Amino acid sequence: MSASYDMSGRRAIVTGGAGGLGRGMAQAFMAAGAEVELWDMSAAALAQARSELGPRVSVREVDITDAGAVERATETVFAGGRVDILINNAGVLGEVKPIWETAPENFQRVLQVNLFGAYLVTRAVVGRMREQAARASAHTPHPLRGHVVNIASIQGKEGMAMAAAYSASKAGLIALTKSVAQETARDGIIVTAITPAAAETAMAKEISAERRADILGRIPMGRFVEIEEVARMVLWLSSDECSFSTGGIFDLSGGRATY
């Protein structure tokens, strides 16, 4: 039996929403009845996402590394009503090189998008989420104000050769998750992260066949995670059924994770 969630009346923001993973999560939220707004830097990619997902999805061009842009976008969204769900999904891969061959500006860019951007969005959204009314739920006697799910990576747990910037940014995102979860634990805001292995997205297509084989060889199940599998876990983590797992880091690695 497939689990189902009623998210009617809920509003979600998905950063990096124009990418394959962002669209997949948005589709799952919309199927459950939620309103979704996609944030992305690319106007063209957002237009493509909207054409695929239909007019029910909202899109907003936002550079999440720009504090002013994030503040303005967040203020506009909350002016239209409460926000129940934030998915920090935006990310870039960066160079696939040993650290002594990497460019400092590239390393910095990866950290700016993957970690600093997530910080800026979380700061703006959670700051306002704390001020909105708690929502009563049939699933828990403890009213909730919202859910935040951060899309980290198995590389944030294990590291990976020739991916120092990406691994470091995702390890930082895991720590950010735990810190914010502690700060908001009494506010009725559930903050979690997932650590998926590679998925069949545009990012996976950036790597060489040799690199792909290396990553695949580290996954005991012998395949990449499906976007739908990520979306299903994120849907549960964003639902009222997830009411006591704040600070949790959830594995989606096909057996690659050892802790």
Image (cartoon, rainbow, N blue to C red):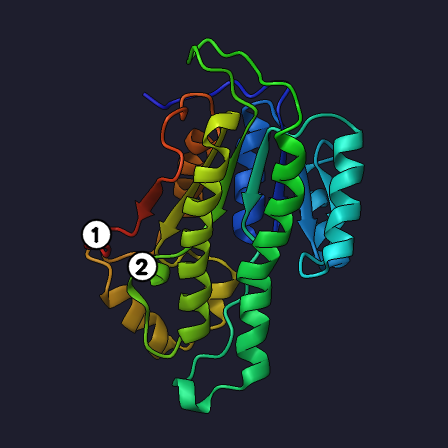
Secondary element at image label 2: helix
Q: Which residue is mark 2?
A: 157
Against 100, is 74 above or below?
above
Query: In the picture provided, is 221 more to the left or to the right than 144?
Result: left
Residue sitting at the far bottom:
101
Rendering coords of residue 192 (x, y %)? 43, 40
Against 242, is 207 above or below?
below
Against 204, is 186 above or below?
above
For marks 1 and 2, the one nearer the N-term is 2
Rendering coords of residue 7 (x, y %)? 55, 21
Q: Is residue 47 visible?
A: no
Rendering coords of residue 124 (x, y %)? 67, 44
Q: Quadrant of residue 199?
A: bottom left
Q: Which mark is residue 11?
A: none
Cα distance in 3D space between marks 1 and 2: 8 Å
Rendering coords of residue 54 (x, y %)? 70, 36
Query: In the picture provided, is 211 more to the left or to the right than 135?
Result: left
